Structures are given as C-alpha cells and as structure tokens.
Image: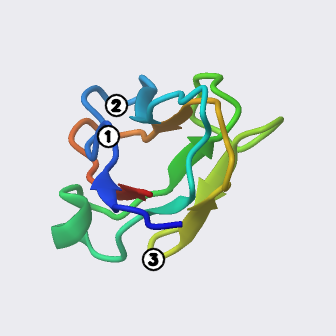
Amino acid sequence: MPVTPTAGANSRVATGGTAIIAVNANPNGINGGYIVNPLTTTDQGVSPVEVLIVDPTGVAPGSNANGTAIALQPGQSFPLIPGQTTAVQVNAATTGHKFTCVVY
C-alpha cells in the first residue's frame, strides 16, 4: 500500500507545560510515523536541552512520564503505531521546544 509522509499537526510546544496535539486523531488509523526529540539546543530551540513527554492515548500529558506518558530524552524517538486512531499529544517544560513529527 503506498503511503505519503506528511508533517504532524504541530512541531513546537506553544506554551511550556501545556500539551499540544502532535498527531491528529484519525478514525481510519495511520500507517505509522515517528516523533523525535532533537539532540541539541539549536535543534530543540531551548537551552538547556530537555525531555519531551509523549502520550499516544489521546490524553494530554503533564510534565512527567507516568501512566501512559513516555519521556523522550534528547536524541530519542518514538515510533507511531500503525493503525492508531487516537491523537498523540506532547508536552515540554519550555515554550518553543521544537520536535520532529512525521506521519504516514
């Protein structure tokens, strides 16, 4: 089945401590993709580098990894789940924290 990689819904935390949607919910499911927390201060756009909290259940994560939330350390990635229908939300401590999100 052909797929077309596209950018996620967002690639920057608008307000530190407030979760945003990185991948929109899709009732048909997605084919996959990834979220990457950049390694460097230049790529994250914040200093010092920090974790990115990811929650694939559609629930807005807080600032800690617990329950269904996962902490991505700088340089780590999270593979998006093929067939997933829920939104993926992310959070970071600092306003403007950039990340990479590709959906296919």
Q: Quadrant of residue 2?
A: bottom left
Numbered circle sitting on residue 75: 3
Q: Is residue 22 positioned above or below 3 on the image?
A: above
Q: Assess disc 2: are there few (<14), some (14-19) or many (≥20) residues with their C-alpha within 10 Å of its C-alpha.
A: some
Left or right, residue 8 beside residue 43: right
Instruction: Provide the residue designation for mark 2.
Output: 16
Numbered circle sitting on residue 34: none
Mark 3, mark 1: which one is toward the viewer? 3
Residue type highlighted by circle 2: Gly
Query: Can you give x and y, in whole percent of width and height, for residue 29 in the image?
Result: 61, 39
Image quarter hosting the C terminus: bottom left
Residue type highlighted by circle 1: Thr
Distance in Å between CA atoms under marks 2 and 1 = 4 Å
At horizontal 59% and vertical 63% (from top left) the residue drawn is 78
Mark found first going from the N terminus, 2 or 3: 2
Query: Can you give x and y, in whole percent of width and height, for residue 46 in the image?
Result: 23, 55
Residue type highlighted by circle 3: Gly
Taking depth in this image into account, of 8 and 1 the one nearest to the observer is 1
SS assignment at label 2? loop
Left or right, residue 2 beside residue 14: right
Taking depth in this image into account, of 73 and 60 the one nearest to the observer is 60
Q: Quadrant of residue 65?
A: top right
Distance in Å between CA atoms under marks 3 and 1 = 17 Å
Mark found first going from the N terminus, 2 or 1: 2
Instruction: Provide the residue designation for mark 1.
Output: 94
